[in-house]
Amino acid sequence: FGGDLRRGLEMSDVIIQVLDARDPLSCRTTSIEDYINSNRPEVAIVLVLNKIDLAPPHAVDAWVRHLSAIYPTVPFKSATGTRRGNAVGHAKEKVSEASASKKRTPDCLGAQHLLQVLKGIGLGTAGFGGKAKMTVGVVGYPNVGKS
């Protein structure tokens, strides 16, 4: 891996790999997963299945079940740019609990679930040594929705 990517992987306590829900395997980087598992096994990997509003719900459910058997997987729908004052809207419920109409709103879905997963990793990992914070690296192919 190149310099910036390698430094990011070496500095991170958790790696979030963002995948496009329409075709998650085509944008999954197993070489990064293999590198982390071989060289930094204490680093947690979390998969974020983004753009769930653009994929059929039954396909999203199947991908979440399949990928969750490998790594923690969070279905996610990014906010679509509508702002309320200075903040982007965030729905409080998990994606699985959101109605179909809620999935069509400009609000972000899945952020609370992702935060819960990250907090769980932080609480359950002795490797953090009581640190109050963790470093999270975000990786993914172009245009999967990392930003």
Image: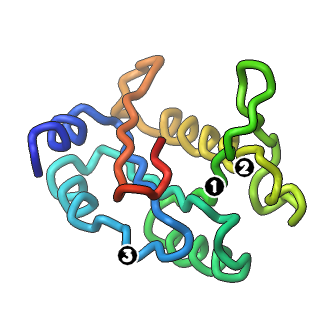
Give the SS element for disc 1.
loop
Number of other residues with Cα within 10 Å of mark 2, as a class: few under 14, some 14 to 19, many 20 or more: many
Q: CA distance from mark 1 to mark 2?
A: 6 Å
Element marked by disc 3: helix
Which circle marks residue 61 in the picture?
A: none
Q: Position of residue 92 (x, y in %)?
A: 81, 41
The residue at which mark 2 appears reads as 109
Q: Are marks 1 and 2 in contact (CB under 8 Å)?
A: yes
User: Which residue is nearer to you in this view: 83 or 126?
Assistant: 83
Callout 3: few (<14), some (14-19), or many (20+) C-alpha neighbours within 10 Å? few
- Residue at 60% x, 45% y is 114
SS at circle 2 = loop
Q: Look at 24% across and 36% down and name the residue there.
A: 8
The residue beneath circle 3 is 26
Q: Earlier in the sequence, mark 2 or mark 3?
A: 3
Disc 2 and disc 3: Cα gap in Å?
A: 23 Å
